[in-house]
Image: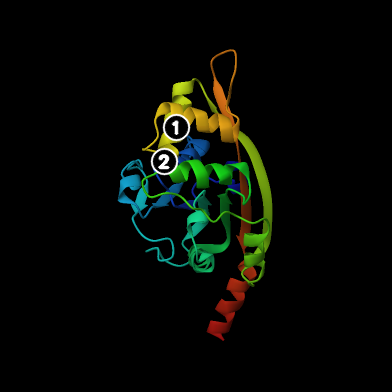
Amino acid sequence: MLQILLPQPGETILVVAAGGGYDAVGIQQSLHPAQARIICVEPSEIFSAHIPRTFEIYNSSFDCIPLASHSVDAVVNLAAMHHIDNRSVVLREWTRLLKPGGRLVIGDVEEDSTNAEFMNTVVNEFTPGGHRGIFLVPGQLSNMLRDTAEWDEVEECRCDFFWEFTNEQEMLEFTQLIFGMVKANREQIRSALQQYLGATSDRSGGYRYPWSLRFCRGIKSPVLEASLSNAVMS
């Protein structure tokens, strides 16, 4: 995500669906010792309670964020778009918040992938509210952005990587926490990771399992903003 976002010192970066603040922390650490203004939007007060208080936090919906138009340099939404039904509405809101030339980065699980099967089967079984995600179809988000006149550059890519852990306990605890699988015990999580994702160990006692995300990145057009400003002034 950081290689696609390319955060810069002094920027204002909006993390939408901030969860417990993992993405915000990762962005800030990538800039250290430089700083950026990082704003976290997370509707759930349960999740946002875990966000470090060094960040600005808003418990608001994704489609009505209490910030001024053209006030952020980048909007990041990671692994949450599959919960959003009306994507055009949130995309309009995030576009409103971006400065001309600002960056939108969205990453989520791809439809019909093993990750999608894991989430809609295992996570669905072991979370209190269940989980039925609407995952990304290749080209879907980029086409939605290209259908408007507000974007200069739009690109998509799929990134494959591994979640890596120093030991099995760390792997099981991380997986239970990040997916909210409070109804599962250690053996159920271990079995599911092996069955669906092929979790493996190495000689040093470390563990890992594969994951992938489809990313869409767009650059908001500065030309359109200038044209609108000139039209208002004339």
Foreground label between 2 and 1 = 2
- Name the image quarter holding residue 64: bottom left
What residue sits right under mark 1 in the picture? 174
What residue sits right under mark 2 in the picture? 126
Report, in whole angstroms, how far the alpha carbon at label 2 lies from the one at label 1. Answer: 15 Å
- Name the image quarter holding residue 140: bottom right
Name the residue furthest top: 203
Name the residue furthest bottom: 234
Tell me the amino acid under the disc marked 2.
Answer: Phe
Q: Residue at x 58, y 83 (%)?
A: 231
Say whether disc 2 or disc 1 marks the residue closer to the N-terminus: 2
x, y percentage for residue 60?
36, 59
Question: Secondary structure under badge 2?
Answer: helix
Indicate the quadrant containing the C terminus: top left, top right, bottom left or bottom right.
Answer: bottom right
x, y percentage for residue 69?
46, 67
Q: Residue at x 54, y 41 (%)?
A: 118
Please tell me which residue lies in front, 4 or 163: 163
Left or right: where 114 falls relative to 44: right
Q: Is residue 191 above or below residue 155?
A: above
Way the structure is coloured: rainbow
Please tell me which residue lies in front, 7 or 202: 202
Question: Secondary structure under badge 1?
Answer: helix
